[in-house]
Amino acid sequence: MIRLAPISQDVEAAVALARRAAEAYGYDEHHEGHLERLEAALRSGEAPGALLLDGDRSVGLALWDEGSPLGVSVEAIYLVPERQTLDAYEESLDAIEREHGESAFVEGRWDGVDPAGTERAMRARGRRPFARSEMRLSVDHPPAAATPPEGVRLRIATDADRTALVDLHARAYRGRLDRYLFYRDPDDRKDAERLLADLYGGRWGPPIVDASVVAEEAGSVVGACLAVRPPYGALIADVMVDPAAQGRGIGRAVLEASVTALERAGEKNIVLTVTEGNSSAAGLYERVGFVRTVGPSGGWYTPSKAPVVEDG
């Protein structure tokens, strides 16, 4: 039976397993900085997770996030090829939930297992599927063409916009799955304030000030695109539009303005992530020239904990 053991019991085994998992997931040289940070977190004990043992042998690695009031979010379960069976993955998840409580989210890629089998197992646990993909700006993307609608002005975001951005984020993500993926506080505004503090504080890389754009109409911020610089390039960390202003081209305008600024600064690797099923966001990114490069990575969520509004 699979059981958990502290990563500190064999750090080098954990690092080797993380590398094998990254290779299986399709990560490449563009993600080397991310892998280096993960390895450093494993070695320092800062990465919540455990080795998966069969007897005394390390046969896998599990990583999770314990910070959400919804419950633990299992970010990865990787087993070595000879132990990649549905039973072994379920044993691994059971072991995590025995020690940490019911999981709110579970990463859904179980290498070596028929996806239909994984789906049956997770649906039997009362979970519903979701998926996210990395998208990278194509080298031959179409030229920026969109302009903001009449009465909307684009400008660089400043520190004075922080309160407006918190309010915008709370409105834009209310009821969306993305709201729950980084969930820490049941109050929408407090959670948005915490998330923006993380973003500006460098959690995902230093903010790229000259490529972080807001759209302003009648003195109010109605859209924004915020960029940061992780080790592997430039990340479009947030594209948001006030629900009352959607459908007017504001999202495209702020995204293209940010991309243009990044390219002028010499950025060659510009990425973002999208939740599959959010067809409006995915369609926008594709029209601007982003293509899927990693994923979709499937996952499962508990609908009673994360009541999601369907994309319209």
Image: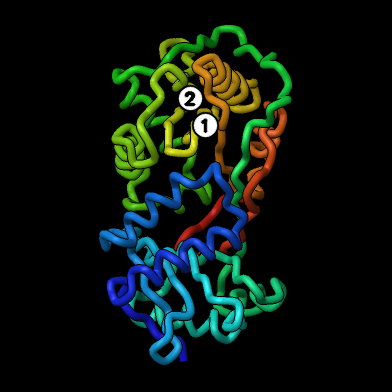
Marks 1 and 2: CB-CB under 8 Å?
Answer: yes
Amino acid identity at mark 1: Val
Mark 1 neighbour class, 10 Å CA radius: few under 14, some 14 to 19, many 20 or more: many
Residue visible at 56% across and 19% down in the picture = 263
Quarter assignment of residue 15? bottom left
Residue 45: x percent and y percent? 27, 63
Query: Image check: 116 left or right of 149?
Result: right
Depth check: 128 or 13 in front? 13
| Label number found at residue 239 | 1
Badge count: 2
Mark 1 or mark 2: which comes first in sequence? 2
Please indicate, yes or no, whether residue 254 appears anywhere in the rendered image. no
Q: Secondary structure at mark 2?
A: strand
Residue 252: x percent and y percent? 62, 23
Residue 120: x percent and y percent? 66, 78
In the rendered image, the vertical position of residue 289 relative to residue 119, given as above or below: above
Q: Secondary structure at mark 1?
A: strand
| Label number found at residue 259 | none
Amino acid identity at mark 2: Ala
Residue visible at 48% across and 47% down in the picture = 32
Q: Provide the residue designation for mark 2.
A: 224
Q: Quadrant of the C terminus?
A: top right
Please indicate, yes or no, whether residue 70 appears anywhere in the rendered image. yes
In the rendered image, the vertical position of residue 31 relative to residue 200, given as above or below: below
In the rendered image, the vertical position of residue 292 relative to residue 79, given as above or below: above
Mark 2 neighbour class, 10 Å CA radius: few under 14, some 14 to 19, many 20 or more: many
